Amino acid sequence: MTRPRERSRSWVHGYLERVAWSDAAIVVASVVIAQWVRFGTDNTATNGEGLPAGLVTAVLVVSWIGALRATHTLDRRIIGSGSQEYSRVVTACLSVFGVLAMVDLLFKLNIARGFLAIALPIGTVGLLVSRWLWRRRLIRQRTHLRNLEQVLVVGGIGSAVPLIKRLLSAPALGYKVVGICVPERTASRADVDVDGQGVPMLGSFDDVCAAVDRCGATTVAVTSAEALGHEAMQDLSWDLEGRDVDMLVAPGVTDIAGPRMMLRPVAGLPLLHIDKPRYEGANRFRKAIVDRAGTVLILLVIAPVLAAVAITIKLDSRGPVFYRATRVGINNTPFRMWKFRSMVQDADVLKENLRSLNEGSGVLFKMRDDPRITRVGAFIRRYSLDELPQLFNVLGGTMSLVGPRPPLPDEVERYDGRVARRMLVKPGMTGLWQVSGRSDLSWEESVRLDLSYVENWSIMQDALILWKTAKAVIGSDGAY
């Protein structure tokens, strides 16, 4: 008889406790630094209408930590992956300072603005960096098979295998599939092969609780709720509650972000309401402002780099410094995209002779050892320096900092109806395709990532993509 495995997620409590203490330390440090910069070491200083600076500091610290708890920034369901953790931290920081500003205005406390102007950015950035560092540590542990959620998948083979594949392809999410329970008619199989990895078959739907005890699962993921039935789902949730096991239900839709989904109980049944894709979101005024302001700042910082690359290209080979390629932008409108020239002259003409050596997938043309690339071109392509002039496109409004990959006209001609939705927003200098493998991605995966971005756009997602792009470029992952 198989001995039950111990089920434990004690690491979660320890992790959350360490993050909580880290948050508190950063909040205290940022407020103390702000007080020291604004008032020095004078213990008798006042901040506002006779209010002791120490009192204001103490109230702000308590309120700030309280706001972090009120916005559920330590919810274990969002810790370690996704953008929601960072979004809640930012919301908590802005909320506490917004409320403080309103109280100051209503009661005319005249709290020093310099004090707040120092504490808010230092604390917010500090909290975000701290959460990122904790997450990197957690991801490293998960890649070494530590701090994992043990997942038992419940559902038919057709719905369970895609979920298992997604979990296997993303170990940083922290899910390890330890077994599967399937309908009675297939429960006799020994195991299920998923991309060469065998997943143990632990029985039928009637054996879920016994399977949980056998494999030590901490999470049960249901992929076939309709096959299990409403009454059985309710009974299962009650049984798992007593075992301290989480229950997840896959709704059968993919690549739809949380803000587009809302659960609505109707006549006792939980119905998932899915909003329409946010095509217009990525074209809104605030994104345009962020694009322009960010581009100006970046150009000011990297101006010496642009000059150095331009001089090196001119000295390395004959031809112009820039390459003006025709790309297709929003609503299938063609535009001329700026790039540093990384190939020999007439590279487009030579491309036809290399069609038989194409290593790209789908409609893409890619070669790892493209003979048209110059010596300097190989270097600047490796670190994406050839794409820096696209900042001029962003400044001119034909591109965005973040968006789908800008396609060639002949690629667009071969798009089907689904892929064509990529053209409903401005193409970007970077995007999900850039931070998820770049040239190593298959055509299907590139399309999926672009459509996911287009339909689920958010400012926080853009910020995360820009951050990940810097890491991908420095590591030169998937670039050729």
Image (tube, rainbow, N blue to C red):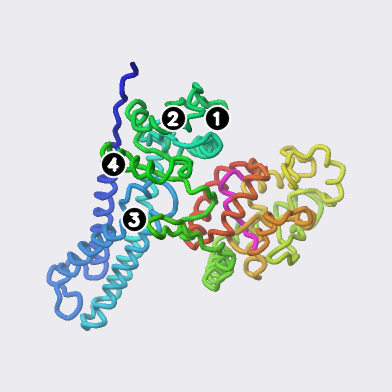
* 364 is within the stretch colored magenta: no
Distance Cα–Cα, label 1 vs label 4:
29 Å
N-terminal label among 3 and 1:
3
Q: Which residue is mark 4?
A: 241
> Within 10 angstroms of label 2, few (less than 14), some, or many (20 or more) residues?
many
Quadrant where the C terminus is found in the figure:
top right
**Range of magenta residues:** 426-438
x, y (%) of residue 47? Answer: 19, 75
Could you say where residue 231 lies in the image, as x and y percent from the top left? Answer: 37, 44
Return the residue nearer the eye: 185 or 88: 185
Q: Earlier in the sequence, mark 2 or mark 1?
A: 1
First of labels 2, 3 by sequence position: 3
Q: Nearer the viewer, mark 3 or mark 1?
A: 1
Q: CA distance from mark 2 to mark 3?
A: 46 Å
Query: For this rendering, which residue is in front, 122 or 281?
Result: 281
Local secondary structure at mark 4: helix
Q: Which mark is residue 194?
A: 1
Q: CA distance from mark 2 to mark 4?
A: 20 Å
Q: CA distance from mark 4 to mark 3?
A: 33 Å
Local crowd at mark 3 within 10 Å, few (<14), some, or many (≥20)?
Answer: many
CB contact under 8 Å: marks 3 and 1: no
**Residue that mark 3 sits on:** 127
The circle drawn on residue 204 is 2
Q: Position of residue 218 (x, y in %)?
A: 34, 36
In the foreground, 33 or 324: 324
Residue 120 in which image quadrant: bottom left
Residue at the extreme left of the image, as rendered:
44
Side (left or right) of 172 relative to 402: left
The foreground one among 338 and 86 is 86
Q: Which mark is residue 96?
A: none
Q: Disc 1 residue type? A: Val
